[in-house]
Image (cartoon, coloured by chain):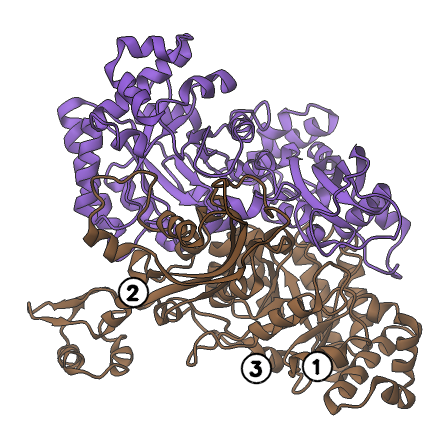
Chain colours: A brown, B purple
Amino acid sequence: MPGTKCATPAHKLNGHHSLALFFKIPCIDALQIVNKVLRGLRANFNWYNHYITFHDGVTVRNPMSVFATDRIEADYLVETAFPVDAAVAVMAGEQSSGTFVPLPGETAELKARSAARVERIDIVEEDVGDGPSLPGARHPGTGPVKRARVTLSWPVANIGPSLPNLMATVAGNLFELAQFSGLRILDIRLDQSFAAAYPGPKFGVEGTRRLAMVDNGPLIGTIVKPSVGLGPSETAALVTRLAEAGIDFIKDDELQSDGPACPFEDRVKAVSQAIERHAERTGKRVMFAFNLTGDLDQMRRRHDFVVSHGGTCVMASLNSVGLVGMIELGCHAELPIHAHRNGWGYLSRHPLLGWSYIAWQKLWRLAGADHMHVNGLDNKFCEANDSVIASARQCLTPLWPDKPCIAMPVFSSGQSALQPPETFRLLQSTDLIYAAGGGIMAHPDGPAAGVESLRSAWEAAVSGTPLEEQARRDRALARAIEAYS
Amino acid sequence: MPGTKCATPAHKLNGHHSLALFFKIPCIDALQIVNKVLRGLRANFNWYNHYITFHDGVTVRNPMSVFATDRIEADYLVETAFPVDAAVAVMAGEQSSGTFVPLPGETAELKARSAARVERIDIVEEDVGDGPSLPGARHPGTGPVKRARVTLSWPVANIGPSLPNLMATVAGNLFELAQFSGLRILDIRLDQSFAAAYPGPKFGVEGTRRLAMVDNGPLIGTIVKPSVGLGPSETAALVTRLAEAGIDFIKDDELQSDGPACPFEDRVKAVSQAIERHAERTGKRVMFAFNLTGDLDQMRRRHDFVVSHGGTCVMASLNSVGLVGMIELGCHAELPIHAHRNGWGYLSRHPLLGWSYIAWQKLWRLAGADHMHVNGLDNKFCEANDSVIASARQCLTPLWPDKPCIAMPVFSSGQSALQPPETFRLLQSTDLIYAAGGGIMAHPDGPAAGVESLRSAWEAAVSGTPLEEQARRDRALARAIEAYS
C-alpha cells in the first residue's frame, strides 16, 4: 500500500525543505537565501511575510511573498431589486471590512489592504418579471428585479491558504443579505498558496485504476443494496456474487457505516475474505469502498483496519464529516477516498440559492477526495443531464497546471446499459466509475449479464457503435435494453 | 480553567466504567452483570448488543439494549404533486432499505429490522395553487401540488449513536428526490444513546456567566469591526477601548482567524494583555471569543495558546469546520465554544428547502457548542423576527431532561438599544449574549454610552418599564433611541 504522506503546508516548512520552492522563483533574494540555507543558517518566516530575517540578523525579501499579492476570486449569480452595483457593494463589504455604520477604525488604507473588490458585473436579466425568487428580500420601491453574474475578489492575505476560512469568506453571511432575492456561488478560483497547503487526491484516476486493476474504460461499479439491513456475512455473500459477476468496484451505502446491525470491522473482515478468495481464484481484486464515516478517531481506526485487511478504498460522506473531517482523513489516508455527496440537494436544489457543484467540488478535491459523486444521466433524482455532465467535466479539469487534483467522477442513480453512449458522447472520457444497482442486480439474466451489458454498452460508446448494432452481437446488452427501456 | 474531559462514548466503556449506567436500569440481568463485574470478570460487549457474554461463558441479557429498540425521529415539510403517502413511502425507502427495483436480498424480515417508518402525515395545504416551489420535480399528470408535515423514524440500530451518520440518514439524498418540489427538515428527536455518546456544551449558561463575570442579565457584547483589516495591536487597542466602555464580551469577526495581516497568536498575545491590564485595574475580565477556525491541528494549537494566555472563550465557524471538526473541538476544549453559523443562509433561506434551525442547532449543541448565533430582531438580514425568537427559544430548551445541553443564544446583526424590550417580551429570558457593533461604537456619545444604553434598555425590558420612560432617566438610552430609530 503506498504510504503517501500529507503535504506539509508551505508555512510549516523550514528553510531546508523550502529550497525546492525557492528555486521556482529565481531572483537575487532567492540566491541569497539559498546561500544562507546551504551554510546551515536557519530563519523563522511564514510564506506570506515580505521579508525573512535570518539568525545572523540579515533580512532579505521573501521571493515567496508574491503570493501575498494574490487574490481569491468567486463568481456568483445574484438577484436583486436594488441597483446591482450598490447591492454588490454591500455584498463585498459584508464579506470583508464592512458593517452597517462607518466605524472609527475604518481608514482608507485599511480598506485598500483588506476590502473585497468587485471585479465584474454582467447583467444577465434586466427584468425577471415574475417577482423575487426567495422571500425576505427588501425592495427599494422602484425598479425591476434583475439578475447578474458577479465576480468578487479578496486578498489571500485576509485569510491565508485555509480551506475552512475560505468557506466563511466566499460562502458566509452573504446568502442572508436582504438586498438579494437570490444568491448562488457559481465558481471559485484559488491561488497557488492553496495548492501548497493541502494534499489533494493521493490516488486520483491513475492510482484508482492501479488498485482496481482496470487499465482502460470506466470502472464498472455497484452499491451494496439494500442500503441497510444486511449483516456482515450477508454483505460478504453479495460481494462474492458480484465479484463472480465480474464487477470492478463496490461501495457501501451512505446509510451504512458502523451500525450495530452491521458493525464496520465485522463487515471489513467478511468482505475482505470474500474479495481475497475471489482474487486467489481469478487474480482480480475487486475494489470495495468501505464507508468509514464517523467521528475522527473512528475514521482513522477504521481506515487503518481496512488497510490491515488488504482493502483498497474507503468512503466518507462529505456533508457528514465536513471540511475539517475530510482534510484530516485526506492527510491520514493511504487509500483512495470515495467521497459521497449525500445532502447535496439541500445545498443546491434551488437554482438561485446555495452552491453550484463547480465551486463546491473544488474544496473537497483539494482536501483529498479521489472519487466525487456526480449523479448520472436520466437519474431518479431531479438533476438535469447538462448539470450532471458539467459536474463530471469539472472533476476531470485540473485545479492548477502543476497540481491538477483530478478526482474520478462517480456516475450513479438509476444507471443501466442505456446511458453509456450519451454519457461518453458528452464527457469524452472513460476516467470514471459507472455505478449501477438495479442496472446490474435486476438484469433478467442475473448480475453477470448485468455487468456484461454495461461493459458492452461502454465499448459501443467508445467505438462509436450504435447501441442497437452492438446489441445484435451481445445478448446481455440486448436483454438489458429490453428490460430497462 | 476547568479541564472537563470528553465523555467516553458508551460503546467504548468496559464493564467497570459501565456500572453507573447499569444501575440506572435495575433488573435481574443488571444485578447478574454487576456481580460478575465485581468479581473481576470481564466481557466484550457493545451498548447495542442484546446479550453480553462474559469470559466465563455465561450469557445474560444486556439491560442497556433497551436502546436498540429506540428510534430516531425527524419531521419534514414536504411538497409533492404525487399522492402524499406514496411520495413519503419513497422518501422512507430512499433513506433506509430502498432502491428503484426490488432486489433479491430484500426480505420482509430485513425490512422490518431496518426500514424507516412513516409515523405521521399531516396535510397542511391541499392545493398550493401557484405551482411547484422547486424545479426538477416530476408530476404524475393529475392532482394538485400539496404540502404536508411528515414524521419518519429509524431504528437507532441502523447507525448507532453517531452524529455524522445521523446526518446522512435524516438529511441525505432525500432533498433531491424527484417526487418532491419542496423538502425541508423541521426537527429531529434523538434517543438517549446520543446523549451518552457526545459531550454537549461544557460551559453553557452557567459556565459562561462565571467566566465572563456576569451574574444577571444578558452579556453585552460586540464584534471586532472592521471585520478584517486591523492588525494585532490595532485590535488590542479596540479591545481596551471597549473594555473601558464596560463591555462583557467581544468576538472576532468570522472573517478573521489567522490571516497573515493579523496572525492568531500575535492577536491573542496583544488582546490578552489588554484584557489583563483592564482586569488588574478594575477586577473585570472581558470575555473574548478568539476565532480559531482552521484545520484540526491549528484549532487545537490555537485553543491551547488561548488557554495558556488566560483567555476565556474560543470561536469556530460551524459550516467551515463541519461536524467532525466541531466534535473534535468540543472534546478538546477547556473553554466555552462560541459557535458561528455563517453560511446559514444557503442551508435555510428557501422556506421549502434545507434545514430549519430547530433541527440544525441540536446537532451542534450535542457536539459541544456553548453559544449559538440566532440573528436578532429587526436584523439587517432577511430573517423574520418569529424565526429568530423560535431559534433562541430552542437553544434554551433542554435536549434531554438529564442532559439539557443548553447553549446561550447570541443575538446580533443590526442590534441597538431599540430591540431589548421586544426580545425579552418574546423570549422571557436574559440567558443570552446581546451583541451590537454600530449599536455601541456609533453611539453619538461614544462606546461607553453605547454599552450603557444597551444595559439600560435591558433593565427596562426586564422590569417592564417602557423604553421611553427609562430614557427620561438615562441620557445614554435617550440618545441611542434618537440615533438608531
Task: Return the residue found at the far left.
Answer: A57
Task: Name which residue lies at 82% across and 87% down.
Answer: A466
- Kind of residue at disc 3: Glu
Inspect this view and state whether residue A260 appears.
no
Q: Quadrant of residue A70?
A: bottom left
* Location of mark 1 (residue): A424
| Front-most of residues B194 and A169 | A169
Residue A102 shows which numbered tag?
A: none
Task: List x then y, in percent, for residue B265.
Answer: 24, 49
Task: List x then y, in percent, for residue B55.
Answer: 67, 44
Residue A12 shows which numbered tag?
A: 2
Q: Is residue A236 left or right of residue B428?
A: right
Disc tally is: 3
Task: Name which residue lies at 26% across and 20% down.
Answer: B479
Task: Name which residue lies at 18% across and 82% down.
Answer: A27
Which chain does the numbered disc 3 sit on? A
Mark 2 neighbour class, 10 Å CA radius: few under 14, some 14 to 19, many 20 or more: some
First of labels 3, 1 by sequence position: 3
| Quadrant of the frame with the C terminus of chain A | bottom right
- Kind of residue at disc 2: Lys
Q: Is residue B469 left or right of residue A214?
A: left
| Quadrant of the frame with the N terminus of chain A | bottom right
Q: Secondary structure at mark 2?
A: helix
Mark-to-mark CA distance, 3 and 1: 19 Å
Which chain does the numbered disc 2 sit on? A
Q: Nearer the viewer, mark 3 or mark 1?
A: 1
Q: Secondary structure at mark 1?
A: helix
Task: Name which residue lies at 65% across and 50% down.
Answer: B168
| Front-most of residues B396 and B234 | B234
Mark-to-mark CA distance, 1 and 2: 43 Å
Residue A206 shows which numbered tag?
A: 3
